[in-house]
Amino acid sequence: MVQDSGSGWSVSADTHKEMLLALYIRDLAAIESCGSPSLAALSPKVKPVSAREMAGHSTGELRQEWQSWWERIISDTDSGIDIREEPDFSDFSDSPSLQHLLRAHYGSAYTWTQSRLGEYQDVCLGDSNELVAMVAQLLAERELEGTINRGFHLKLVELPLAERRAWFVEPDTVILSQELIRDATLFRSYLGPIVDLLF
């Protein structure tokens, strides 16, 4: 995690294990997410399972169960299930279709998630310093204008998403593509209005 703070504000950037796992399962099962935020596909692309492997599972039921899981994740980005090599699937006992899918594909999902976490540590963490510095600059500009919301904290969640953009999740979280930092103008176009909204 990378953090910075100023007079009455702080910003942090990190990735999120459970979000990575959930998005892998979403793309694996070709679940069309509904609600907000509806994030882009992962990068590198996850190959969907065949229709034969999904036989016997209601697409609507799986989508609803996944969506409930996703809403739990984004409602409290600081908590979540324990992502480990040999998990306990009891957290999904009320979601039988999702639990079955997780049991069948957890090994590949876990390996993929661990690879992305390793890449984040090796490559993206350095970019996170730049990311936090750019947000700190936006906040410093607002301070100079005299518009500062004391006690302001912004959590940035970096994910390997195929589309360079950001998604705001109330009350204080921004999910963004790890690639967004590569385009400073585009980055400011997404984060500037969010900072203005929260200030």
Image (cartoon, helix red, strand yellow):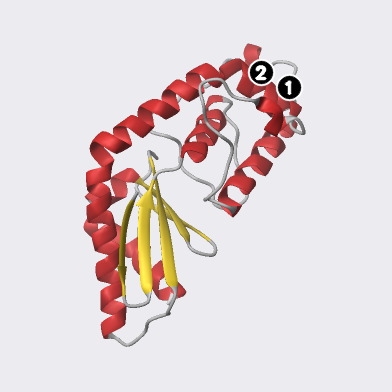
Sort mark 1 into few (<14), some (14-19) or many (20+) by Cα contacts within 10 Å: some
At label 2, which amino acid type do we have? Answer: Met
* Residue drawn 44% across the image and 29% down it: 113
Direction from residue 194 to residue 75 in the image, left or right: right
* Figure quadrant of the C terminus: bottom left
Sort mark 2 into few (<14), some (14-19) or many (20+) by Cα contacts within 10 Å: some
Q: Which residue is mark 1?
A: 57
Q: Which residue is mark 2?
A: 54
Q: Position of residue 111 (x, y in %)?
A: 44, 21
Direction from residue 35 to residue 185 in the image, left or right: left
Q: Secondary structure at mark 2?
A: helix
Q: Position of residue 64 (x, y in %)?
A: 71, 38
Q: Residue furthest top?
A: 52
Q: Relative to 39, does residue 119 appear above or below in the rendering?
A: above
* Residue drawn 51% across the image and 32% down it: 21
Q: Position of residue 6 (x, y in %)?
A: 30, 72
* Residue drawn 64% across the image and 11% down it: 52
At label 1, which amino acid type do we have? Answer: His
Q: CA distance from mark 1 to mark 2?
A: 6 Å
Direction from residue 150 to residue 128 in the image, left or right: left
| Total marks in image | 2
Residues under numbered marks 1 and 2 in contact, where contact means CB atoms less than 8 Å apart:
yes
Q: Position of residue 137 (x, y in %)?
A: 24, 69
